[in-house]
Image (spheres, coloured by chain):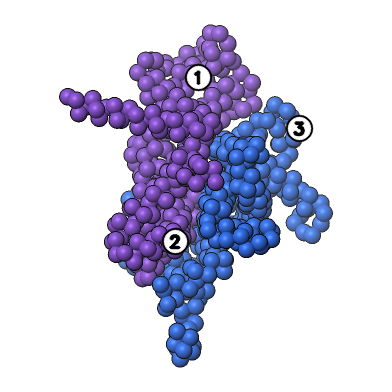
Chain colours: A blue, B purple
Amino acid sequence: MSENSKTKPWSERILKNYAVQTIFKKIFIIWVVVTLSFLIVRGLPGNPVEIMVLNLMDSQGISEDEARTRAASLLRLDLDAPLYVQYFDFLGNLVQGDLGESYVLARGKPVTEIVFQRLPWTLFSVGTSLLISFTVGMFLGMLAAYRRGSMLDQVLTNLSAMIGAVPNTLWAIILVLLLGVVWKIMPLNLMRGSLSPGIKPGFTLEFFVDLFKHWAVPGTVYVLTTLGGWMLAMRSSTVSVLGDDYVTVARARGLPDFRIITAYVGRNASLPLVTALAISIGFLLGGSTVIEFIFVYQGVGLLMSQAITKRDYPVMQGILLVTTITVIISTAIADLLYGWLDPRIRTSGGENAE
Amino acid sequence: METISHKLGAIWRETLKTLKLIARNKIGLLGFVMLIGLILMSYLGPLVIAPEVRADVSQIYKPPSWEHPLGTDFQGRENWVMLVHGGAEVITVAFLAGLLTTMIAVVVGAFSAFLGGKADEVIMTFTDLWLALPRGILLIVTAYFVSLEDVWALALFLSFFGWPSLARQVRSQFLSLKKREYVEAAQLLNLGTPHIVFREMMPNMMSYILIALIESMTGAIYSQTYLVFLGLVPFGNNWGVLFSLAYAKNAIYNPNAMASLLVPMGGIVALQLSLIMFSRSLEEIFNPRLRTGV
């Protein structure tokens, strides 16, 4: 086999490389999603473009022909051209970063500009929360698995199950209710939005304090809703790994506990979780629609709920595309991590499978 | 005649055995009892208790009292009656969606892991494709355009979006099981793929699959809750709709209206709680290594 890989041309070796294959796959997926999103707006039975035309006629008092031209220019599509021409126009515009213009929310503003203005807020709030809940959840999960059956395990698993069982919408409402209405310990009206008025982003202490002040409550909701899941997944994963023969053997060999916990148990137990990490980003971005709506946090989620109520299709499409690409990049990172954590996966993708 | 009673006896003994196994874990037993209670309340309750059909303007937003045990809502309807009638839809959707999600995920995951090679690559690329979609947002956008008129449509819709992450997890479980000695032994003995998958690997994955089923159910309740909250699922008076309506009517800032917000929320929370607690028992039943306390 080693002789075989030496004689292979370098071009083939690059193509068989796990990382390169992963990246190719992701590019393919992006293309499919872009096509899907085109079809949602142009091909779905409800035909959003027709609704958009009606909307424009209604709201701006213009004739149907004018409204059609307006819709076409907003979407950057020639609505009378054959569908495949529209599709290639759409792809061409996309490559140039042109996703059309918003027509209700911010009339005439490019969608890309609007979405990219909002995206950092959501990525910050969701990303920070995810990092916290993942780290803490993994730690607590392993702790519970090691002490399984003990009082600590009982308390941890049951508490996290109870916390994780409550949907994010309900948590947001409960927190507003408790902190703002019943105990009145937080001025939730002042904490709405993503920054207090008058504070400019920059490397100032004032900015960071304000940033985390506004993140605190919605961030707590994200952490609360995901923490239990990570903990329980890590616990059951660790429990099943703990019974495995190689752990017993490692113990019998007299390896230090720390090494067994990290290299043998931790590494194998975290495998299913790493796959789930990337997935949960996509999930949280969806959940942010409700959370940001309740806390008026100025991220893509709030933009989404506004676009839905105002039927701003170009904005909806823009959010879908931009978040998709974000999620794909994060799954690519998770895939590469997975290959690093589990060499079995990395090699079985190559020529010497099984 | 004798065989029938014999069979009934056997079923009864099996049931007792299962109940005993469930009872091994106190939390799990509590979850089981709660779940049965909620199911009985939601499916049998409406047969006994008449629904609140009329609005009573004189009884709007009454706090809990002897006369109104759980208070009244913005139309003067009894919250406890709404609670009894609002559960069936939520539970049915959750169960159907959970079942469909798990079925799709197990089939896809098992096939992918077992076929390996090119087939695995194709199936996983397809799964990745679904995963890569920010399903939360796509769920919202599609729910906006597709009409989700009944329970089946919503369940199908939710499972359509829910299966890929589970499928990948099932696949990685299968992959790691595939490396175990007993599976390799079965392969060497040429026992055939169906035998290996269903007799050797499945029993070892039962706990995983059942817990995945419950997770899918809670996931379905979760997604359902925010779709309803965003007003994308035009359903009747189920718990989700009730609390969303109460929230939209600013019940959160009105102490007298609080009950109409908290009661349906409590229904959803209790359902989620019972499911997750019950899964604790299942975990113990299906993982013999846990049962013997090794």
Q: Estimate the x, y position of residue A112 in percent, counting from the top left.
A: 56, 61
Between residues A266 and B11, which one lies in front from this camera angle?
B11
Q: CA distance from mark 2 to mark 3?
A: 55 Å
Q: Which residue is mark 3?
A: A185
- Specify whether A287 is left or right of A191: left
Helix, strand or loop status at disc 3 = loop
Taking the view exactly as shown, the residue that stands out farthest to the top is: B67
- What's under tag 2, amino acid-wise? Arg
Circle 1 chain: B
In the image, residue B273 sits, relative to residue A27, either above or below, namely above
Taking the view exactly as shown, the residue that stands out farthest to the left is: B1
Q: CA distance from mark 2 to mark 1?
A: 54 Å
Going from N to C along the chain, the mark reached first, 2 or 1, is 1
Q: Which residue is mark 2?
A: B180
Question: Does the residue at mark 2 contact the one at mark 3 (Cβ under 8 Å)?
Answer: no
Q: Nearer the viewer, mark 2 or mark 1?
A: 2
Q: CA distance from mark 1 to mark 3?
A: 29 Å
Helix, strand or loop status at disc 2 = loop
In the picture, the quarter occupied by the C terminus of chain A is bottom left
Circle 2 chain: B
What is the number of the mark on residue B79? 1
